[in-house]
Amino acid sequence: MENKEKFGNQLAECIGLWLAEGDNKTKAEITFTNSQVELIKLFDQTLRLLFHNYLFNIRLYIYSPNENIIVKSPINNCIIKRYIDKRATRPYFIWRLCSKKLNKKWKDKIKLNINKKVYYKSILKGFFAGEGNIKTGKKSNRTIRIAQGKRIKSIEKILNHLKIEFRYFEKERNYYITHKFNWDKCAKINLAELHPIKKTDFWNAYNSYKEEHYKSNYLKKELFNALTKHYLPKSLALKFNRSKARIVEILIALKKEKKINNFRVKSQDYWVRNDQQVIIISKLKEKYLKLLEKYNKTQQFANYFDVDHRSAYKRLKELEELGLVKRNINKEWRRIKIEKEIITI
């Protein structure tokens, strides 16, 4: 179910990419043009998965500004054609799948998904990766722009649903999104996540906003209220538009008051309220817990995971500190029944 949901969002991202930079006029092929390697890979991988039950050939056209620039193909199992485009300022790719049948299926899939609200965020992320950009100027002006020759109702519908205010200027052929509250909404959905360069530009501009000032203890109270779910400090810093250092300072203060606790998983601290009655562990520790149905000696765990005795003992000791296991006088480990929910990350 999780994989199906993940692919659904991935497909929606590619629908957004194609709406931005695909050829919607032809009925004989599916094409996608972009200069970003990561986006070509994403589109290729997604459509291969979507049409895995069909036979087809993919062609990749690689355009370079001159013959001195040799660009490696970002994908395999395709026919590669190379050309020179002297008008281009940088290399770019055209991904092409020739098939009337699959073109129709692709457009049917778009019609089916474009009005599903569950995919709105992913479609918008894909569209921004294709046609979006960030503009910063004098007087700390920050603007999210989406280039589009004509207004596109499907994208406006998504922006309205997400309550992201926008303006469209026909002369500039651009959608404009400004003001901090709109940036907050775009940051929350990771609007620029798919495109590495645009992602950097987005967060540089967003993080340049001055920190909001809160009344005394307001931030502390809001942080506590938010921790009914587990969070990383960097996520809380983004949520409350504060520095990570400031967030950690407050988290430590709340921990000293015994109101919250942190769980170390893969070198990262996840914070949650004590009254939520949860314990957060890694997938590796979860495996140790499950194996307690079969093993009870440290060396048995060491043999199973192909690690030394010391490493296995350390993992089991960490589980003991969390109150999940106990070692008896015979040096045998056993699992302890608890009322708390165990969350695996």
Image (cartoon, rainbow, N blue to C red):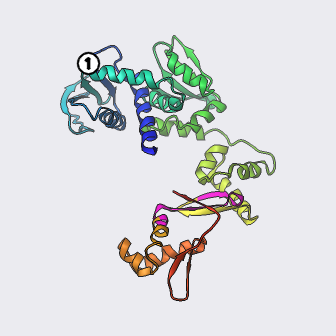
Residue 100 highlighted magenta (yes or no): no
Residue 177 in view: no
Q: Does residue 72 appear to the left or right of 221 in the view shown? A: left
The spot of residue 70 in percent (x, y) is: 21, 36
Indicate the quadrant containing the N terminus: top left, top right, bottom left or bottom right: top left
Tell me which residue sits at (58%, 73%) in the image: 336
Which residue is found at the position 29% from the left and 32% from the top? Answer: 51
Q: Position of residue 15 (x, y in %)?
A: 41, 27
Q: Is residue 280 magenta?
A: yes
**In the rendered structure, which amino acid carries the disc numbered 1?**
Lys
Please provide percent x and percent y for residue 345.
Answer: 51, 56
Q: Quadrant of residue 337?
A: bottom right
Task: Compare residues 60 and 116 and report the one nearer the observer.
Answer: 116
Residue at (45% x, 81% y) in the render: 297
Residue range (magenta): 270-286
User: Which residue in the rendered view is the most extreme toward the bottom?
Assistant: 329
- 343 vs 35: above or below: below
One can see residue 230 in this view: yes
Q: Looking at this view, is 59 or 243 the one in front?
A: 59
- The residue at 55%/24% (across/down) is 158
In the image, residue 310 above or below residue 90: below
- In percent of width and height, residue 250 lies at 71, 57
Q: Secondary structure at mark 1?
A: helix
Q: Quadrant for residue 156, please give it.
A: top right
Q: Quadrant of residue 107?
A: top left
Q: Residues within 10 Å of mark 1 (few under 14, many from 20)?
A: some
Left or right? Give the position of 207 relative to 45: right
Residue designated by label 1: 100
Left or right side of 293 for 157: right
Say how many tags the image has.
1
